[in-house]
Image: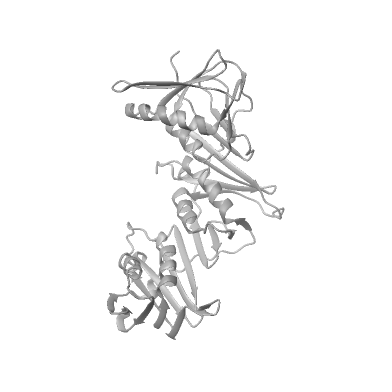
Amino acid sequence: MKISILKNALNESIQHVSKAISSRTTIPILSGIKLDVTYSGVTLTASDTDISIQSFIPAEDDKQTIVQVEQPGSVVLPAKFFVEIIKKLPSQDVQMEVKENFHTFISAGATEIQMVGLDPEEFPVLPSIEGNQTISLPGDLLKNMIKQTVFSISSNETTPILTGVLWTLSDNELKFTATDRHRLATRSIHLEGTDDISFNNVVIAGKTLNELSKIIPDQNTLVDIVVSDNQVLFKIDRVLFYSRILDGIYPDTSRIIPDTHKTELILDTKKLTESIDRAYLLSREEKTNIVLLQTMENGGIEISSSSSELGKVREELDLVEFKGEPLRISFNSKYMLDVLKVVESEQLMIAFVGVMSPIILKPLDDSKSQYIILPYRTAN
């Protein structure tokens, strides 16, 4: 293998695929990045068995030569060193040559590097994904849906299925659900042209979705998503992102969502966020994050928290609207702030059934999002 390639293009592809490299792999070949060179361009691949990422660099793009191929071939290079050294090369033009026993020589300007490569034949073959379960989403929308749900996944590996986000598609509605049993986040959208497509119990690891978000460009990009029995493939421009579907059955969360409520508050999202944030500063000192919210006779609410060492914080907030019965309820302020940080609506509805029933949060101008937080028992 012998090529000349533009550093920026190579570095961009390396940054994409390196997100699939695991530092804890017990399989030596998976600590490397595979390069496949043909006359049409260079394909980089990395995998940790849970996710695999492939990025293609065309030989020519917009009439600009990016890769000059003198001799096609393949090699696997150690990712840790390869990722760092390429972005630090002094010249935009990079020459790479693979010789006997996969010894690889890289040069740019006055810099020359020798790397011990590995046999590409030992690198695992990427999953074969077949089927017509294909949907397309704007990249910014997909990133938003991930951001608005992934924070509610469980970090407890003893229940692996809850470390992922559940995807369901039925009746043209794509829905994301995440829960750690103490809170719940759901986000759904209507998808045109998916009458013949449906799936359920597709659960993708939260850490995988976070890595996917980093690859999706901020500008308008369409992401094609192919769903098979045990894998999901995301196609983003020239990047292919494969993810394993988590094993197990995701619990039925519909039973914990109350159908009715006794108290309903509508608040200014920004003012509520700032108030909870101040109360959180004190509550976290107790290692509990507990904040108390109670309605007041003047039609407002009081938010308070205390620390046995530092003191107490208390403040009143005006309500946009108040319906129903008076209420006094305690909750995890960290969980509440996690929701408030992803709510884009200026006003938020908070509904309560009772002191030990789930707290329901709904952005007023977003009927497709809903959040649930379980309260703490309050001593009246």
Q: Position of residue 302 (x, y in %)?
A: 48, 19
> Closer to the camera, 318 or 33?
318
| Res. 316 visible in picture | yes
Quadrant for the C terminus in the image: top left
Quadrant for the N terminus in the image: bottom left
Q: How is the image coloured?
A: one colour
Q: Residue sitting at 41 percent across and 59 percent down? A: 19
| Res. 71 visible in picture | no
**Residue 46 falls left or right of residue 252:** left
Q: Look at the picture and state if 346 lies above or below 115.
A: above
> Closer to the camera, 89 or 77?
89
The quarter of the picture where residue 137 lies is bottom right
**Residue 222 falls left or right of residue 51:** right
Q: Look at the picture and state if 205 lies above or below 91.
A: above
**Residue 339 falls left or right of residue 362:** left
The quarter of the picture where residue 20 lies is bottom left
Q: Residue sitting at 49 percent across and 57 percent down? A: 243
Q: Residue sitting at 30 percent across and 81 percent down? A: 101
Q: Position of residue 260 (x, y in %)?
A: 63, 25
**Residue 227 falls left or right of residue 52:** right
> Closer to the camera, 6 or 169?
6
Q: Position of residue 240 (x, y in %)?
A: 51, 64
